[in-house]
Amino acid sequence: MKTGTMKYFVIFTILFFVYAEANAQRMPHGGGRGGRGGGAASQNFGNRGTVNGGAQRAKTRPATSPSKGTTNRPQASKPATRPSNVMPKNNNVSPAGNRPNKSGNVQNNNRPNNGHNNNVNIKNNNVNVNVNRNVQVNNYHHNNYYNGYHGYHPYHYHPYQPYYYGPMWHPVGFYVAVMATTAVIVSANNQSYYYDQGVYYVESSKGYTVTNPEMGTTVQTIPEKREKITLNEKDYYYYGGIFYKKSNTGYTVIPSPDGALVTHIPDGAEEVEVGQEKYVFYNGTYFLPFVQNGQNMYQVVEMVPVEEETESNTETSK
């Protein structure tokens, strides 16, 4: 009897707690529906207002509701590298790839042009090519013999390639802040130079700048890479675009001998088109390109103004 009573008591107790729990869970929803202006707003209807005309949001949002924005929105991944067909924004970048010369060419805008430059620039392997219509080759060279050769050598174009004389040689316009201790001072025509291993410097703002020397400048030595030139039984020397004549006092700078043959022209020269041919112009001298025994060489040629040549031909015809 007692066992049965205990069994009914346990069952009753369990049913009571189940009923109380179920009723407790039902209570919030029942109260919300009783007042239509309250719990109904807890349902998520986006931006729709409540029945009582308010636009109030629910006081608490479901924990699983995503926040405004795109928390879970997939992001478009950017490419790791720019496509090859996209051009750079810098319009100043030349697509042709013309870059500074490897040999450190210094273009001297103050290079003398003897009034012959018509300012027509044509790029050719980073070498300036100017068209000069004011001069022409002196036709009277056909009457001269150069080491037994009648007239100039036949023209044979080959591109001008600046010759590298070594780390101690620098082109015209090159600047150094400190002068080497091996330099000596030489002078000509009231102009003084610092001379060091074939290069002439003049003082400039806070340093020294390479230049070409005046005619008559004499130095004691010139570098071993010099070229010895024999022209019509006379010996000359050539180094770094400068011609010398040897004497008891040393090596004196002279004008370029007409018809002299050289193998190298330094950095700083330019190609000049005269007529239908291209010559190399350096320090006031025109060099004719030609080939001798398979070697590219240059010959000093004399140019004369076109008007002067025309007048000479007219007088000859008379």
Image (tube, grey):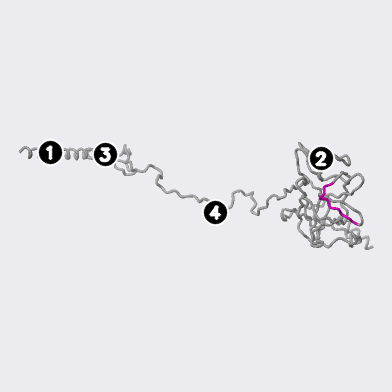
What residue does disc 2 label?
183
| Residue in the image at 78% along x and 41% along y | 209
Q: Which of the two discs, 3 and 4, sits closer to the camera?
A: 4
Q: CA distance from mark 3 to mark 4?
A: 57 Å
Disc 2, SS: loop
Q: Which residues make up the magenta segment? A: 222-231
The residue identified by callout 1 is 10
Please say if the residues under marks 3 and 1 sit with CB atoms less than 8 Å apart: no
Verify CB contact (< 8 Å) between mark 4 and mark 1.
no
Residue in the foreground of this view, choosing between 26 and 234 = 234
Q: Which quadrant would residue 20 be assigned to in this image?
A: top left
Q: In this view of the protein, can residue 105 be seen by the observer?
A: yes
The CA span between labels 4 and 1 is 78 Å
Nearer to us in this view, 231 or 48: 231
Front one among 112 and 166: 166
Query: Of discs 2 and 3, which sits in the foreground?
Result: 2
Dot 3: element: helix
Could you tell me the amino acid type at mark 2?
Ala
Q: Which residue lies under the disc numbered 3?
A: 39
x, y percentage for residue 120? 76, 54
Which of pointers 3 and 1 lies earlier in the amino acid sequence? 1
Mark 1 crowdedness (10 Å alpha carbons): few <14, some 14-19, many ≥20: few
Residue 164 in the image: state x and y as whole percent.
Answer: 76, 50
User: Who comes first in sequence, dot 2 or dot 4?
Assistant: 4
Foreground residue among 11 and 315 = 11
The residue to which callout 4 is attached is: 83
Camera-near label (1 vs 2) is: 2
Judged from the image, the secondary structure of the residue bearing numbered disc 1 is helix
